[in-house]
């Protein structure tokens, strides 16, 4: 379980997160949504230590994440970014192999085998020798997901993974994520505006605004009867 207790984050005088309390159970799919600037991306980055917090605590399986080695934390909690985050000077295959070998000290032969398996799983095995610049945005995001999965994390965080993609690629990525949730039973925390994905896959929806969790509910309840005026306003604009 991931547990956030009274988590706050600020940049100078700007309060980005304010007293966030949230629990994510193993096997859950939680969608985090809300208007731009509400703190969604910052929230999930605090979970795996990419952003520090000013107050509160974040526990991973009852261990304070501030006391965990970054390598151990990132192996347990993987991350997929909206801008892919691939190494431009490395081939697709090496993007998956290098973190295993240099960060997690895996045997290179084993790392290559795992990388090929994961690339095949996302339909990118035939592109292993290409460089990121030779791929479309959707293909790069597939590689990014494979890279996050290759270290076998217990939790996987997605930060608006489809925001930079064309409509066809969006559906491809959502299909991969749906498979991870429904067939692989992975624990996912997804920042997204793709409400069709949320309705289909998420167990819970967390709605944020102004750095706070305004509403948290089971998916069907959130879409059928949002309780806060702010969530009602958001849904009226995003769902046509």
Image (tube, rainbow, N blue to C red):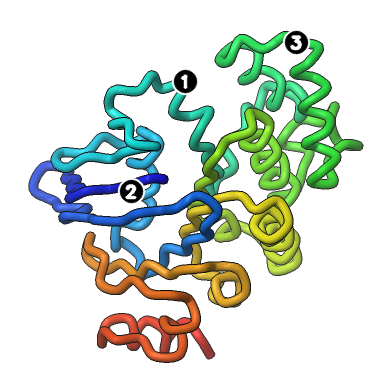
- Number of numbered discs: 3
Between marks 2 and 3 in the image, the one whose residue lies nearer the viewer: 3
**Camera-side residue: 129 or 106?**
106
The residue lying at 51 percent from left, 68 percent from top is 203
| Location of residue 161 with respect to 117 vertically, above or below | below
Q: What residue did someone put label 3 on?
A: 108
The residue lying at 66 percent from left, 37 percent from top is 149
Disc 2 to disc 3, C-alpha distance:
34 Å
Residue 128 image offset from top left, x and y in percent: 84, 30
Q: What residue did someone put label 1 on?
A: 71
Is 64 placed left or right of 107 in the picture? left
Residue 106 image offset from top left, x and y in percent: 67, 12
Residue furthest left as drawn: 13
Tell me the element at label 3. helix
Residue 103 image offset from top left, x and y in percent: 56, 15
Residue 119: which disc? Answer: none
The residue lying at 14 percent from left, 51 percent from top is 14
Q: Would you say the residues marked 3 and 1 are in contact, meaning their CB atoms lie under 8 Å apart?
A: no
| Location of residue 70 with respect to 139 vertically, above or below | above
- The disc, 3 or 1, on the residue closer to the chain's N-terminal end is 1
Q: Report crowding for label 1: few under 14, some 14 to 19, many 20 or more residues within 10 A (C-alpha).
A: few
Q: Report crowding for label 2: few under 14, some 14 to 19, many 20 or more residues within 10 A (C-alpha).
A: some
Q: What residue did someone put label 2 on?
A: 42
Tell me the element at label 2. helix
- The disc, 2 or 3, on the residue closer to the chain's N-terminal end is 2
| Location of residue 110 with respect to 11 vertically, above or below | above
């Amino acid at each position: 379980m991931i547990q956030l207790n009274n988590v706050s984050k600020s940049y100078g005088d700007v309060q980005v997160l304010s007293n966030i309390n949230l629990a994510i159970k193993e096997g859950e799919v939680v969608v985090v949504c809300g208007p731009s600037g509400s703190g969604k991306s910052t929230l999930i980055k605090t979970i795996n230590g990419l952003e520090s917090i000013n107050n509160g605590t974040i526990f991973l399986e009852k261990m304070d994440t501030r006391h965990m080695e970054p390598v151990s934390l990132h192996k347990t909690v993987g991350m997929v970014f909206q801008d892919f985050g691939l190494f431009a000077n490395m081939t697709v295959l090496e993007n998956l192999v290098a973190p295993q070998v240099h960060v997690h000290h895996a045997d290179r032969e084993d790392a290559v085998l795992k990388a090929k398996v994961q690339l095949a799983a996302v339909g990118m095995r035939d592109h292993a020798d290409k460089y990121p610049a030779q791929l479309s945005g959707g293909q790069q995001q597939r590689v990014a997901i494979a890279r996050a999965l290759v270290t076998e994390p217990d939790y996987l965080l997605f930060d608006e993974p489809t925001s930079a993609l064309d409509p066809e690629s969006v559906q491809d990525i959502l299909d991969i994520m749906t498979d991870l949730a429904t067939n692989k039973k992975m624990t996912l925390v997804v920042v997204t505006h793709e409400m069709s994905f949320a309705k289909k896959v998420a167990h819970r929806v967390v709605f944020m605004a102004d750095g706070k969790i305004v509403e948290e509910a089971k998916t069907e309840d959130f879409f059928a009867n949002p309780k806060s005026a702010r969530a009602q306003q958001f849904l009226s604009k995003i769902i046509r």
